Image (cartoon, rainbow, N blue to C red):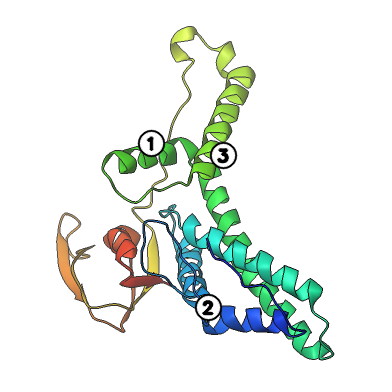
Amino acid sequence: RGVMASAGTEDGASLELVNLAQGSSVVQIDESDEEAVTPAEVLAKLTVAWQNEVCAPRLLPHRCDLLECIIDQIEGMEENISRARSKNQLKLSLHKMELHRVGYIASHYMRKRLQKIEIDAINYLAEDNARRRDGKRELLSEQERIFAERYARSQSTLQMKCALSRLPPALQRLPVTKLDVSRERVFIDVVGDEVQDVSVPDMTDPLSELIIQLDKGSTHLIPYQSIAEHLSNDKIRLL
């Protein structure tokens, strides 16, 4: 998690906020990651993760490492602002506004993920288990797993009490449906190197596919399933 230096001057809060915006201090996102990054870089990464999460029809692998770091930074900045005695109230108000903006990104990212989990909790738990077995990036954080398990259990209990208990024992099974995103289309911006071997449906033949290349800097409207696996390599950003 990020570490904030304590403010020793009247403008301490301003100093810390400038650090977050301009990247003049250093934090560590993950203990296994030896490369240190600045708060500005963490915020930029979280902003992209938030934008992708909002635009994606399915839940994306979590970035709670970034989220925890930003929350630590926010708490440190709030403490510095509360201690600040700057006479420049306009400057202090601008810092508070920036703090609220960063807080909105973090809170909306969390809310959006929880909303998606509520829609398809059982399948997301199964997908997360499969990704952990295969050594891939985890879909759910530990806190999200707890939430998903409790939500699925509560949903199952409610359906059993309200409906399934009145059916014959052979039919007392909770139906599990999977969210179909085969028809979902998304706008993307290619921000990394060119993305090759992207398969898209051939509109002239429903049974065929076309293999295309996405050039850097280009923008496309494309089926979500065609680019879902490329989101993790930071070459594509959803719009």
| Label annotation for residue 63 | none
Viewer-side label of 3, 2: 2
Residue 27 x %, y %:
49, 69
Marked residue nearer the N-terminal end (3 or 2): 2
Residue 18 x %, y %:
61, 84
**In the image, what residue type sits under mark 1?**
Ala
Question: At numbered mark 3, what does the secondary structure look like: helix, strand or loop?
Answer: helix
In screen coordinates, is 108 left or right of 197? Answer: right
**In the image, what residue type sits under mark 2?**
Ser
| Label annotation for residue 126 | 1
Please state which of residues 163 and 41 is positioned toward the viewer in this rendering: 41
Marked residue nearer the N-terminal end (3 or 1): 1
Please state which of residues 1 and 130 is positioned toward the viewer in this rendering: 1
Question: At numbered mark 1, what does the secondary structure look like: helix, strand or loop?
Answer: helix
Q: Which residue position holds label 2?
A: 25
As drawn, 180 above or below 211? above
Please state which of residues 207 and 175 is positioned toward the viewer in this rendering: 175
- Image quarter of residue 112: bottom right
**In the image, what residue type sits under mark 3?**
Phe
As drawn, 196 above or below 89? above
Q: Which residue position holds label 3?
A: 147
Viewer-side label of 3, 1: 3
As drawn, 164 above or below 41? above
